[in-house]
Image (tube, grey):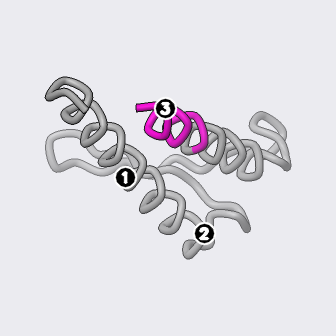
Amino acid sequence: MDKDKFIRAIEINNKIEEYKDHKMTLENSNIKYGGGLIFTYNRMHNDVPLKEEIFGKNFFQLYMYALDSKIKELQKEFDEL
């Protein structure tokens, strides 16, 4: 493996680990039962409740599916290196 591929493999692996950690955090949270978002800007926090009629009942499942898809995509790219 040449140096460029090795560096790319490290970058992809780090991104995969970041997404897996994010997935684990989400799975361990109670967001799947509803909730809101907290936006942080310059140490100021704003809580924003999510409206189910806008984001839908399956928002969390769709987000997790997209996250799984991204992990699989990156894993495939990693394996091809």
The verdict on residue 16 being magenta is no
In the image, 12: left or right of 65? left
**Quadrant of the frame with the C terminus:** top left
| Cα distance in 3D space between marks 3 and 2 | 29 Å
The secondary structure that most of the magenta stretch takes on is helix
**Which circle's residue, 3 or 2, is located before the other in the chain?**
2
For numbered disc 2, what is the local secondary structure? helix
Q: Eyeballing the image, is 21 above or below 65? A: below
Amino acid type of the residue that numbered disc 3 sits on in the rendered structure: Glu
Q: Quadrant of residue 53?
A: top right
Which of the two discs, 2 and 1, sits closer to the camera? Answer: 1
Which of the two discs, 1 and 3, sits closer to the camera? Answer: 3
Q: Residue at 35% across / 38% down in the picture?
A: 12
Residue 6: x %, y % from top left: 22, 35
Q: Quadrant of residue 51?
A: top right
CB under 8 Å between callouts 1 and 3? no
The verdict on residue 79 being magenta is yes
**Quadrant of the frame with the N terminus:** top left
| Cα distance in 3D space between marks 1 and 3 | 20 Å
Amino acid type of the residue that numbered disc 1 sits on in the rendered structure: Glu
In the image, 47: left or right of 50? left
Residue at numbered disc 1: 18
Residue extent of the magenta highlight? 72-81
Q: Eyeballing the image, is 72 above or below 77? A: below
Which of the two discs, 3 and 2, sits closer to the camera? Answer: 3
CB under 8 Å between callouts 3 and 2? no
Residue at numbered disc 2: 27
Q: Between residue 73 and residue 65, name the one nearer to us.
A: 73
Residue at numbered disc 3: 80
**Which circle's residue, 2 or 1, is located before the other in the chain?**
1
Q: Residue at 23% across / 39% down in the picture?
A: 41
Q: Between residue 6 and residue 32, name the one nearer to us.
A: 6
